[in-house]
Amino acid sequence: MPKAIFIDTTRCTACRGCQVACKEWKNFPAVPTKQRGTHQNPPDLTHYNFKLVRFSEHLEGDVVQWYFFPDQCRHCLEPPCKEASTVDGAIIRDDATGAVIYTEKSSKEDLETVRSACPYNIPRQDPVTKRLVKCDMCIDRVRANLLPMCVKSCAMGAMNFGNREDMLKLAGERLEAVKKEFPKASLLNQDDVSVIYLVADLPAKYHEFAVAGVSGSMTRKQMLARIFAPVRKIGQQVRG
Amino acid sequence: MQTSTHANPRALRDIEMALERTKAEIPVLTPMVTAFGPLLAERFRLREAASGWVGPLPVVDAERFSQGVFVLADSGFQDMSAHLSEAAHGLLPIMANSFPAMAQELNTLIAAMDNGALTMDALAAAGFGEAFTVPGVNAETMDFAVAELVRPFVERQAQDLAKLVRDLPWRQTICPICGGTPNMSVLRRIRNDSEFIQAHGGRRFLRCSCCATEWTHKRISCPSCGCEEPDELVVLSDPSRPFERADACHRCKTFLLCLDTGELADIPDPDVAALTMLPLAHQARRQGFVPLAEHPWGGL
């Protein structure tokens, strides 16, 4: 049964427990960083950071509003990265859970091709193995009937995991409740993705790639990726 | 006190999925799951179809209740004998199929019901422990069959009664509805919309061996003797399945199976979970502990 993660950013306190828990479960090392005047650290997703709590500040009248956005792969129902893939079996979608997985064959993929196809700017590359990497929905844990690590670690109830239909129902209920206080609240691309965000304000205030360019249809990048996929595939075969 | 019930339309599918998962993850339990799975599924169907408590619900004296007098202390469950014939013709053939060694006796039981040698009133009474013999049916088989037959109706009535005491304090280790002894506990993480940090561990619910009512109880204490000494309380578990454990007490030598659902993606039916924990129960018994109350498969 397809699964989904519902991220209620209105409950997120940016403790970054999910970010740390993800790294710990994957046994990733620390990455060199420095103080940049923000709690967002590291500044972007890396091959050792599949989950990143993004911080952004906006001046609303005389008040500074702080927005938190636990960014990660959305596990699209029809993944554009998979469409853009030129290597068979490099990017797969697990039917049982809906998780989009980059396999070891992804080391033969072109990062920019796959990354430009992603409307959420998620894929990264391991500089050593050249493998493309991102969140895999903790597929090892989910197959063992355990919650993804980020969900398990969330102390505020912002992260939720379950059957897609249940998560959509929960998301709808929360949206209704949140809208009473925040009329601009919305769910982001809930019909297209397995990681559904609830935001209280305009998505662009949270993150440049919080929401896909054109909701419910392909972005320009996706469309181009699909158009050129056969050409790239031929090129890949020619190059061997 | 918080109580918990599991009535939801997907529950049967959840039971079947949990049984399949057990077979896949612990192949050695396949014969047990194959034998008891159909029984658990049919019990669920009967429970969902049962009418529950009929007529006005009993009046609960909050003061007496808070002093430890359970809801049915003065009465007992309502008579369900009118429904037992139909239920028996559904359940007993399934049991005969699942437990071939008992098939002949179970068929004898069905025949006794059909020819009037065993009345439904007697069957219901036998379900609550009254001795009744049917020629050709072993006493143990009789107890097992009638207990399983009556159980879905009891559980369904208990679901209705639990609503009466949901907000009343209950600190006992016996069931607030029927006074039964728990045969397992479940740690459940209850989602709430509070603005505060939520506990990761979840609350501990004891589960009645008779009517399957669940009620909250403190986490660190033996439900049999109340012991809270860390040196006396032991946790038996398999490192590969950290969400399952047996909480045992050296002081009274009892144990209680415990399912920690806090980390689980799909929460299994508690009966299926208990069946899956059979190796843990076996380990506890080998170490000299006895269960606080048995499951149907406990004697195996």
Image: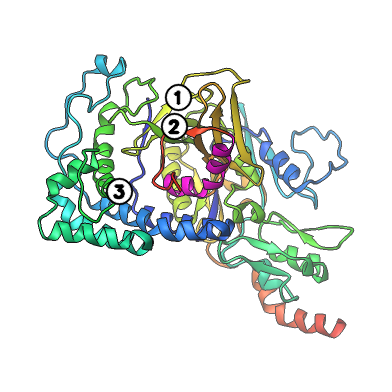
**Residue type, numbered disc 3:** Glu
Above or below, A229 against B147 in this view is below
**Label 2's element?**
loop
Q: Which chain carries label 1?
A: B
Q: Does the magenta stretch include residue B283?
A: yes
Q: Give the range drawn in magenta.
A: B266-287
Q: Which mark is residue B224?
A: 1
Same chain check for tags 1 and 3: yes
Q: Residue B292 carries which label?
A: 2
Q: Mark 3 lies on which chain?
A: B
Task: Tell me whether the residue at label 1 lies in contact with that at label 2, contact meaning CB atoms closer than 8 angstroms.
Answer: yes
Above or below, A21 against A211 in this view is above
- How far apart marks 1 and 2 lie (CA) works out to 7 Å
Q: Residues within 10 Å of mark 1 (few under 14, many from 20)?
A: many
Q: In this view, does A96 lie to the left or right of B170?
A: right
| Main SS, magenta residues | helix
Q: Quadrant of residue A114?
A: bottom right
Q: Nearer the viewer, residue B170 or B202?
A: B170
Q: Which chain carries label 2?
A: B
